[in-house]
Amino acid sequence: MKMLKQTLCGALLGLSLAACGPTEAVEQESAGQAEQPLEAGCVSVDDTLMTTHACTHANNSGDNVNVTASATRVDTAPDISTQHKHYTLTLPAGAEGSVTFTPTNVSGSGTVESVAFYVNKNVALTVVNATTSATVSPLINESVAETGCSLIKAQVYDLTPGTEYIVVSATASGNQVGIVPEYLYNNRDRYYRDQDGDGYGVNTPVYRFACEVNSGYSKTRFDCDDTNPAIFNC
């Protein structure tokens, strides 16, 4: 009976954690994989679960927060750091508007977090370190396409946890822009090495931080012979 209670409690805890946040596998990633920032070779986050997740928040009116952006680039501008929210920024008429964002240590590394800012208009975003006034260059700046989603663009940055940044939106039509911040670590996924190109990979996962699948990998495993494309799904 005690073992049954422990099993039920574990199942309920798993369901609650799965409600909103990263999907964990039984396998554990290595320390090196867990701590790295935006990985080499990651050039797109368009066709990923992170984009789908961001669109879920953009389409849910209950996740929307209305914010009046500052007319100047100051560290006292309104904050948009709360996770799993869609922010509707009202900008000064015909001018840029600023908000602030302070990343948290979601990966446990304490050094770098890769953050994607999704927007619903083709506007330029500028991210500035509030302490040093240094501009942070985006590692990815691309259009995204998700059926039924208002978000059309993503910019990804490597940011330091605990450091405040000023996020500046250029002028936008109607003086409003929608923005959804997402952590790549929270949206990491598992890919499996597919050496024979049959669409099935080996069982040992490689963790990717919300990047599109690389050539030579598959999101499907259970290939018992990854050297023979005629043998798979076994």
Image (spheres, rainbow, N blue to C red):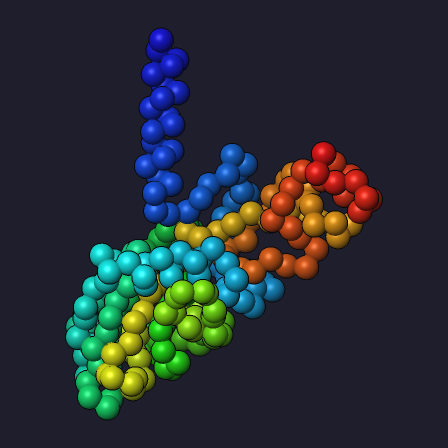
Q: Foreground residue, 151 or 116? A: 151
Residue 230 lies, in percent from the top left, at 81, 44
Residue 177 lies, in percent from the top left, at 29, 76
Residue at the image point whose x is 22% and y is 57% from the top: 62
In the rendered view, tell whether residue 140 sits above or below residue 58: below
Let me know if residue 133 appears in the view.
no
The image quadrant that residue 74 belongs to is: bottom left
Q: Tell whether 202 sits left or right of 32.
A: right
In the rendered view, tell whether residue 63 sits above or below residue 12: below
Residue 140 lies, in percent from the top left, at 49, 71
Residue at the image point whose x is 76% and y is 43% from the top: 226
Residue 196 lies, in percent from the top left, at 78, 50
Q: Quadrant of the N terminus?
A: top left
Q: Tell whether 151 sits left or right of 40.
A: left
Residue at the image point whose x is 22% and y is 81% from the top: 91
Name, please, the residue furthest toward the front: 148
Let me know if residue 149 appears in the view.
yes
